[in-house]
Image (cartoon, coloured by chain):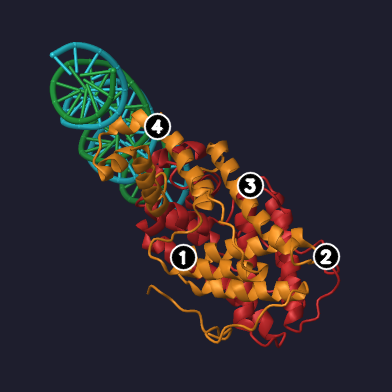
Chain colours: A orange, B red, C green, D cyan
DNA sequence: GCTTGATTACACCGGTCTGTGTAATTAAGA
DNA sequence: TCTTAATTACACAGACCGGTGTAATCAAGC
């Protein structure tokens, strides 16, 4: 039950915005009474925090080469962008919506961003780059930048632009990166999904 | 009067969030009646749109070398991040808050993002880089990425990380970029209103 | 002085929101 | 069958919201 509530809250909060979705809406969507929802979560704030904590899932371990894992991140991003149910980074959105209002939300968001940076860094450590910390930070900038750009432009090709930039940064750090896929044309005009 | 309303709405909308600030709050902050506010703007939506349009000011022309202008962008960003009154990109925040609700808001946000990309592109054209369009896009990714990261982490050094990455990208495109911090010119005076 | 337009105070509307109180209903386990 | 816990329906409180109606007040220009 608790999981069903969280599941639904996740979908609605993420797609429509946290402030835009009321507890009545969530309860109605599942088909339960509002009272039941409040039996599982003491307040909407608690539900919001649980929603963000549930989003905070670390990437599963992979045995692929570090470079492939790093560049693959942007392929996954592009696939996510193409999905209708993609609407930016839930943590950035939450901080933008709730701001200084809820300090806990910000802490969760910071933890998430840092965990992704560390994921990059650990992969870079295995590649013997000169400055794994700084390069990891730069990669997160490309990730978050492409997410923000796609949020407003609805343009999944932002992920490819980020991937190209990541390739250049890795190459500059002495990492051997393969050729760009045949399907990737840097000169392509920026596509638009919606008019 | 209209300008005073916009001024106050700008500050409150940006710092506390659009949905979090009511028209009563704005009127009370200025010390005018709510009726006066509604004499200047037909609805809150109109006020929101005017707020975003007011934020949409293009960067003034500069006669500095293109590379300095490009890298200087990140210096201005860093100074902005350090300010207490910085809370991310108003356009990204607005889209995150209002989402699909208001199509006009999204259009303004898209226009702004594109105008900054074109600003980069026009500078890159003067540098004869192989792919000005793509590189301009990549630079915007670094800008938006550092803004998003600073929004959640409150870490102005993100701008420097972005600048470093930009240097690498420019250098890889055959542009001669000076040593780190060789382009520091303290009195670059461009309105820091945007993003 | 008079007219005109902006601004004011203030009440009020309908709606939505989070959260609670309560009593009835269900279902499962001992 | 009795007990216990979860869930239900439903009303309601209290607050805030966007927006309007109205009549009075103010200020400036003719």
Residue A123: percent from the left, percent from the top?
69, 62
CA gap, disc 2 and disc 1: 39 Å
CA gap, disc 2 and disc 3: 24 Å
For disc 1, the marked residue is A80
Tell me which corner region of the image, top left, top right, bottom left or bottom right, holds residue A129: bottom right
Q: Is residue A191 above or below residue A67?
A: below
Q: Secondary structure at mark 2?
A: loop
For disc 2, the marked residue is B184
For disc 4, the marked residue is A41
- Of marks 3 and 4, the one in the foreground: 4
Q: Secondary structure at mark 4?
A: loop
The answer to whether the residue labelled 2 contacts the one labelled 3, judged by CB atoms less than 8 Å apart, is: no
Give the left or right position of residue A126, taking residue A106 as reference. Answer: right
The answer to whether the residue labelled 3 contacts the one labelled 1, judged by CB atoms less than 8 Å apart, is: no
Q: Residue at x 68, y 80 (%)?
A: B123
Give the left or right position of residue A27, taking residue A62 as reference. Answer: left
Q: Are marks 2 and 4 on the same chain?
A: no
Q: Nearer the viewer, residue D1 or C8?
A: D1
- Of marks 3 and 1, the one in the foreground: 1
For disc 3, the marked residue is B85
Graded by Cα atoms within 10 Å as few (under 14), some (14 to 19) or many (20 or more), the crowding at tag 3 reads: few
């Amino acid at each position: 039950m608790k999981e069903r509530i969280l599941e639904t809250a996740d979908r609605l909060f993420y797609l429509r915005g946290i402030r835009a979705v009321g507890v009545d809406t969530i309860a109605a969507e599942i088909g339960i009474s509002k009272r039941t929802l409040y039996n599982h979560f003491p307040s909407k704030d608690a539900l919001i925090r649980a929603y963000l904590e549930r989003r905070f899932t670390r990437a599963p371990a992979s045995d692929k080469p570090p470079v492939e894992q790093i560049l693959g991140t942007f392929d996954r991003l592009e696939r996510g962008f193409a999905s209708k149910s993609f609407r930016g980074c839930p943590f950035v959105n939450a901080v933008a919506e709730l701001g200084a209002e809820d300090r806990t939300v910000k802490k969760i968001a910071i933890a998430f961003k840092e965990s992704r940076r560390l994921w990059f860094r650990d992969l870079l450590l295995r590649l013997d780059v000169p400055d794994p910390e700084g390069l990891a930070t730069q990669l997160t900038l490309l990730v978050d930048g492409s997410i923000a750009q796609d949020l407003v432009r609805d343009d999944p090709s932002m992920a490819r632009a980020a991937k190209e930039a990541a390739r250049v940064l890795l190459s500059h750090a002495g990492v051997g990166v393969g050729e760009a896929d045949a399907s990737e044309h840097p000169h392509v005009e920026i596509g638009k999904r919606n008019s």
